[in-house]
Amino acid sequence: MALAKPASRKIIHQRHIQCNGYLREDGLWDIEAHLTDDKGYTFPTLQRGKLQPGELVHELWLRLTMDNHLVIQDVEASMPVTPFEICPDVEPNFKQLVGLKIGKGWTKEAYQRIGGIKGCSHLLELLRPMATTAIQTIMPYLTFGEDGHFPLSDSILNSCHSFSDQEIVIARHWPDKYQGEIQIKMEGNDE
């Protein structure tokens, strides 16, 4: 366990989110997310009666099919387990994401199209980790050169601490982008 040992406790709520990226035979990409929620105690619901510990409150799926440019070509939403029988009524609305490109401002546009009463807040929450999964799936696969060197894009440079133009990661792998003052010894350079 990466965290320190916790105080004695009991589980009350569990949410699992898994995102996967797939390359399809037709050259498109499927980015899938699966979300489940359950409680660690007997939980009363308004429509489904009492749920036992571990019984799912939600099981939701979302698939975004996109091209190499992160433009959404198709969407499928599935809500096999929900608190209310009418929740799945919004599944077809997620098709309104077709044509959006993952990038700056895309989640705002998605919320305008399918937010509030037009959608499901839990499925909408999946869009951010799905965007990250899409980028982590597609961009490295397409951009690693034959030499295995990853070209550093402007969108990655300064996107986090490790990719800061002031840090050692940039100095070692993209010295032309490095702006810091750290003097590092490069492999094969004994100076």
Image (cartoon, rainbow, N blue to C red):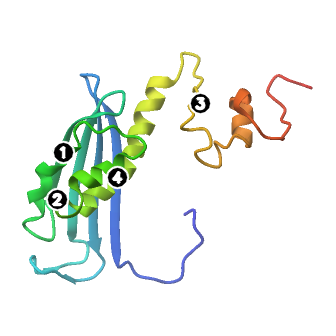
Q: Give amino acid for label 1.
A: Gln
Question: Mark 1 or mark 2: which comes first in sequence?
Answer: 1
Image coordinates of residue 161 in percent, x first then y, are 65, 49
**In this rendering, does residue 34 appear at all?**
no
Say if 145 sits above or below 128 in the image: above
Along the horizontal axis of the image, is 3 left or right of 126? right
Q: In the image, what residue occupies the spot 35% across and 50% down?
A: 107
Q: Residues within 10 Å of mark 4 (few under 14, many from 20)?
A: few
Q: Position of residue 12 (x, y in %)?
A: 35, 79
Determine which residue is flagged by label 4: 108
Mark 3 Cα-neighbour bin, 10 Å: few <14, some 14–19, many ≥20? some
Q: What label does residue 152 carry, if any?
A: 3
Separation of residues labelled 4 and 1 (CA atoms): 13 Å
Task: From this view, report whether residue 148 is shown above or below residue 31.
Answer: above
Q: Earlier in the sequence, mark 3 or mark 2?
A: 2
- Amino acid under disc 2: Lys
Which residue appears at 17% of the width and 44% of the height?
A: 95
Distance between mark 3 and mark 2 Cα atoms: 38 Å
Q: At 35% from the left edge and 27% from the top edge, which residue is drawn?
A: 68
**Distance of mark 3 from mark 4, alpha carbons?**
26 Å
Residue, disc 2? 118
**Disc with the residue nearer the chain's start (1 vs 3):** 1
Image spot of residue 142 (x, y percent): 44, 24
